[in-house]
């Protein structure tokens, strides 16, 4: 039964990937490679600067994860750059596999075990960081909606929309935290036991899930400010993503307002989330970026070049992440394991 479901999932993912590739190919065919080449030539020797905003975003997100880790009294302090590398490795798996941005989370935990971080505590930190990242992304998107509506002239006073949406976002965040405080991991394993009663490994997983839930409860009860700090750092990473869009336009010699760059980045996020089944939202994100640029008065060549630069940055980060994985027993991570 499990084998049949895996085959069906594989077939679905394969169809989604092929559909994304076809959409991307059609997009490039309609816009033309020449348009993209023209804009890339404008960048010239400034091309290495493309990765500068990425470094700032990576450090912001690593700092957000650091807020969710156990206190330095429990484990030795972990350098921020090592957190960033571990996070890049996990995100590379998330981007390159159709796992709904979850497949790389265990990788992040594994790469930090050398610092004395147990599987249970590490998993809890990843859950908290993922929650903070999701909440900050929702806030980021909601802040862009009034600007987007006003920029298109659809709503003259779009700020009245923001209040109710932020209230809904707050309720969603509180619901996520409530589930985690009530034992979300344990409930998930118990549900799996009902679906697959003969899967004996779930008995061991249930014990681990209970320990993870204990770590989550301890975090939310003992350090609620740390969750707020983690959310703030991740939100800063999203804002830097909008600054990256503005920077890319500057390198291309295209004049756009910071508001338009902010709108493009905020409105790209729902498209990326909606295409989670496709690795990297291939095709969907690119077509959405081109269409957003068209709505804001930019030509399709400019939009496609922007998405090509974002893809190049993403590919570079994925390459770094895979390199970390390939050398995780080498010099990038210490080999000595500290016990709690």
Image: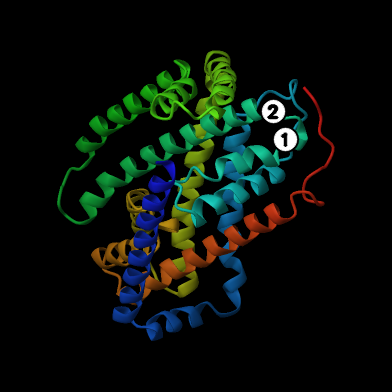
Which tag, 2 or 1, sits closer to the chain's start? 1
Above or below 19: residue 301: below
Q: At x 32% / y 69%, what residue is drawn?
A: 23
Q: Is residue 59 left or right of residue 31?
A: right
Q: Position of residue 307 (x, y in %)?
A: 42, 66
Is there any visible trace of residue 82 in the rendered image?
yes
Residue sitting at the far right: 336
**Alpha-carbon span between mark 2 and mark 1:** 6 Å
Q: At x 64% / y 37%, what residue is drawn?
A: 109
Q: 158 or 122: nearer the eye?
A: 122
Q: At x 31% / y 40%, what residue is drawn?
A: 142
Give residue 19's quadrant in the image.
Answer: bottom left
Q: Secondary structure at mark 1?
A: helix
Above or below 92: residue 70: above
Q: Secondary structure at mark 2?
A: loop
Q: Quadrant of the C terminus?
A: top right
Q: Quadrant of the N terminus?
A: top left
Above or below 308: residue 330: above
Give residue 210's quadrant in the image.
Answer: top right
Local crowd size for mark 2, using a 10 Å CA cut-off: few (<14), some (14–19), many (≥20): some
Q: Position of residue 2 (x, y in %)?
A: 43, 41
Q: Is residue 72 left or right of residue 92?
A: right
Q: 8 or 78: nearer the eye?
A: 8
**Pointers 2 and 1 in contact (C-beta within 8 Å):** yes
In the rendered image, which residue does mark 1 sit on?
113
In the rendered image, which residue does mark 2 sit on?
118
Q: At x 76% / y 30%, what residue is drawn?
A: 116
Residue sitting at the far bottom: 34
Q: Is residue 105 left or right of residue 76?
A: left
């Amino acid at each position: 039964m499990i084998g049949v479901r895996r085959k069906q999932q594989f077939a679905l993912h394969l169809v989604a990937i092929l559909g994304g590739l076809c959409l991307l190919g059609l997009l490039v065919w309609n816009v033309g490679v020449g348009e993209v080449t023209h804009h890339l030539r404008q960048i010239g020797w400034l091309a290495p600067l493309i990765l500068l905003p990425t470094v700032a975003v990576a450090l912001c997100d690593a700092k957000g994860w650091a807020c969710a880790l156990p206190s330095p009294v429990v484990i030795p302090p972990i350098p921020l750059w090592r957190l960033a590398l571990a996070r890049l490795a996990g995100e590379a798996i998330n981007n390159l596999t159709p796992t709904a941005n979850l497949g790389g989370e265990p990788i992040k935990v594994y790469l930090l075990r050398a610092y004395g971080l147990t599987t249970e505590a590490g998993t809890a930190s990843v859950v908290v960081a993922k929650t903070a990242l999701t909440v900050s992304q929702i806030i980021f998107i909601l802040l862009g909606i009034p600007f987007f509506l006003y920029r298109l002239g659809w709503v003259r006073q779009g700020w009245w929309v923001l209040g109710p949406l932020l209230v809904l976002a707050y309720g969603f965040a509180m619901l996520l935290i409530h589930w985690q405080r009530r034992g979300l991991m344990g409930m998930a394993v118990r549900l799996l036991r009902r679906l697959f009663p003969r899967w004996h490994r779930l008995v061991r997983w249930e014990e681990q899930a209970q320990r993870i839930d204990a770590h989550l409860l301890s975090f939310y009860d003992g350090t609620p400010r740390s969750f707020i700090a983690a959310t703030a750092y991740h939100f800063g990473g999203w804002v830097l993503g909008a600054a990256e869009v503005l920077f890319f336009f500057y390198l291309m010699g295209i004049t756009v307002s910071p508001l338009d760059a902010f709108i493009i980045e905020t409105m790209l996020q729902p498209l990326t989330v909606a295409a989670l089944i496709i690795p990297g939202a291939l095709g969907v994100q690119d077509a959405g970026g081109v269409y957003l640029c068209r709505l804001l008065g930019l030509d399709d060549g400019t939009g496609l070049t922007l998405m090509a630069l974002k893809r190049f940055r993403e590919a570079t980060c994925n390459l770094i992440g895979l390199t970390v994985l390939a050398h995780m027993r080498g010099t990038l991570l210490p080999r000595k394991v500290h016990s709690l």
